[in-house]
Amino acid sequence: MSVSVREFAERGADLELVGIQKRFPGFTAIEELDLTIPAGSFFALLGPSGCGKTTTLRLVAGLEEPTRGRILIGGTDVTETKAHQRPVNTVFQSYALFPHMSIIENVAFGLRRRRIGDADARAHEALRLVELDHLAQRRPAQLSGGQQQRVALARAIVNRPALLLLDEPLGALDLKLRRQMQLELKTIQEEVGLTFLHVTHDQEEAMTMADTVAVMNKGSIEQMGAPEQLYELPRTVFVANFLGQSNLFTGRVAGTTDTAIAVDVQGTRLVVPTTRAARHQGEVTIGVRPEKVALHRDAPAVSPSRNVLGPGHVIDVSFSGVSTQYIVSITGVGTVTVFAQNIGIGPIASEGDEVWVSWDVEHGFGLDDDPADAGKFAADDDTHAIAVQRREALVAELEES
Amino acid sequence: MSGEVQAAAVLGGLQESEQLEDSGHRGGRVRRQRIGLGDWLLPVYTVLAFVFLLIPIVYTLVFSFNDSIKSNISWRGFTFDKWLNVCNVEGGAVCEAFANSIVIGLVATVIATTLGTMIAIALVRYRFRARSSISLLLFLPMATPEVVLGAGLAAQFLAVGVPKDMTTIILAHTMFCISFVVVTVKARVASLDPALEEAGRDLYGSPSQVFWRVTFPLLVPGILAAALLSFALSFDDFIITNFNSGSVSTFPKYIYISASRGIPAEANVIASAVFLFALVLVIVAQVSRAARAKRLAKLS
Ligand SMILES: Nc1ncnc2c1ncn2[C@@H]1O[C@H](COP(=O)(O)OP(=O)(O)OP(=O)(O)O)[C@@H](O)[C@H]1O
Ligand SMILES: [Mg+2]
């Protein structure tokens, strides 16, 4: 299927990146990238700052040439095609509105270049969609950051491209407006069946909107899949810590059954189902999400279906309304984070208390990293992930109050 | 002299309007601070500075109405004659010189602005060999004393055997104006966000469409400023012109020659007219800007 830029896309096109490498003078932004996005899907690209998300979008849009590799849109090789001949539009991270044109001229720009009839009417319609039609005659400099961002969105969407690239298109919006725009975007995408490639820092946004999420790190895709799958079964330390939080333990596999492996972590045996573990022998890293861990005041009964760690001491309790986060220090193992729903009244343990933690064996996961690398990955990205989460927790709190 | 003052005035107006435009309606209000120099010192100083700046202009303007006979040094009474018959004295020598200067200025400006703009864009946007040395070389005509430049060019024309006329003057003026155009436009190109052109390409604009609809309109203030500067420099130039003009008369050359026997009032008339023209330009620019701001304010 070849896609013409002279008319509106009937439906989305699939995107295929094959063996892409991008080198800037003195810096390799993307080492080796393979990616297939099926037509009509909402694909989110998630990753820390500087990991190559914008570079990937620019390569697809034709604003940057790959050093190596091929780009296919709707089955057609567009690697050598110029930006203005690709059936692709971009919502730029920096908006890039034309300062010398009014808002309506900005939005109609793409339609006019393609000589599509009714450019003005269509542009007004797109502006109504982002609730800015009343400002159509203004200049970009006379709009707020959030309004400019919505104009950038309208300017791209109005063209109904087979593939829409969104580079953090909702970053400057407040929470309410962002939810509303997320809904609009999802609606447009589903109605026309366009393909969206959406870059974001906001993991919640990625998880709620996208059919498929890809976590990118240092120029390559770490893991890709449905949001639930990515969250429930991360394959690398980076993903486990970037998407939500994780308690990770490293140890040697000490025993295997048909259905599970047992890992010896400083003398405690922790069990992970074989199907949920990427490696089945040698030194491995396993983990569990904090909300799946239970906190006990007394030593829980030993059971083959639960992993138990303890005793340890609570070193931090932070109450956040719906849930309480406990940090438990367990000698030899390190710290374990527990998110507990506040079902009763107030926290069930306080700082200094002796406690045990346990979780259902089925909830654990085994990672694919070499444990030697694990430490390296954790370092800077970890602090970033934590900072993001702290901020989001704060935002959530503010939203509730 | 007066040419440069006008250019500065017009350019000042342009630059200022640009800044205001850029900062938009949200532009910060300047907070006024009281200066502890006493309330009279600053106003007096300001008035003195303006008197110093404006006296030559006022003198020129006033003496263009002087009912002078030969030299225009002492006041002999008020008359409109010189304004009305400006082209009728000395066989229209003043007007001919003036017309020559205008033609030279316009042609040199058009050539220098076109070439200079292209050079400026190339220097900022493209990486090529010898880019930085070219940037440096373009500064040389500005740094070289005009006398040297003029004499050097004259020697070259002589060596090649080109007769000196309007063409040689235009060539000489184009040469030194290009440097100023490049410097002025380059600043504008450098401040242009490349993302805007990329957005143009992304929105199906072919390279020429992107240039004419995005790049060029955004460069216009810089190009206009460069053109005005270029015209003012050319119109004003005496030294280089004198070396390369042969028998062709230009306005500065005419005044220089006639200064030895007392400048005729007709010269004052033309100088005043040029000054008033520049003044009108500035006022029109300011008023139209204010009107636009008002219109926009009404819209919101
Ligand atoms: N023109 C360039 N020359 C050299 N290095 C570049 C260039 N453009 C980007 N890079 C580098 O490539 C890496 C990836 O940049 P990119 O803009 O794709 O990051 P990103 O994932 O979009 O980050 P953010 O989330 O902060 O927007 C960065 O380390 C950046 O410094
Ligand atoms: Mg980016």
Image (cartoon, coloured by chain):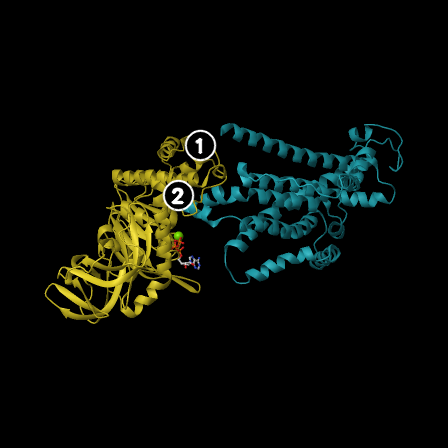
Chain colours: A yellow, B cyan
Which amino acid type is shown beneath numbered disc 2? Leu
Circle 2 sits on which residue? Answer: B203
Q: Which mark is residue A123?
A: none
Badge 1 local density, few (<14 within 10 Å), some, or many (20+)? some
**Which image quadrant is residue B272 in?**
top right
Question: Tag 1: residue type?
Answer: Leu
Q: Chain of mark 2?
A: B
Circles 1 and 2 on the same subunit: no
Above or below residue B178? Residue B97 is: above
Q: Nearer the viewer, residue A112 or B56?
A: B56
> Badge 2: few (under 14), some or many (20 or more) residues near its Cα, within 10 Å?
many
Q: Where A272 falls versus B187 (above or below)?
A: below
> Does dot 2 land on a helix, a strand or a loop?
loop
Q: Which residue is mark 1?
A: A135
Task: Describe the element under mark 1 as helix, strand or loop.
Answer: helix
Q: Quadrant of residue B220?
A: top right
Question: Is residue B273 found left or right of A328 in the rendered image?
Answer: right
For the C terminus of chain A, the image quarter is top left
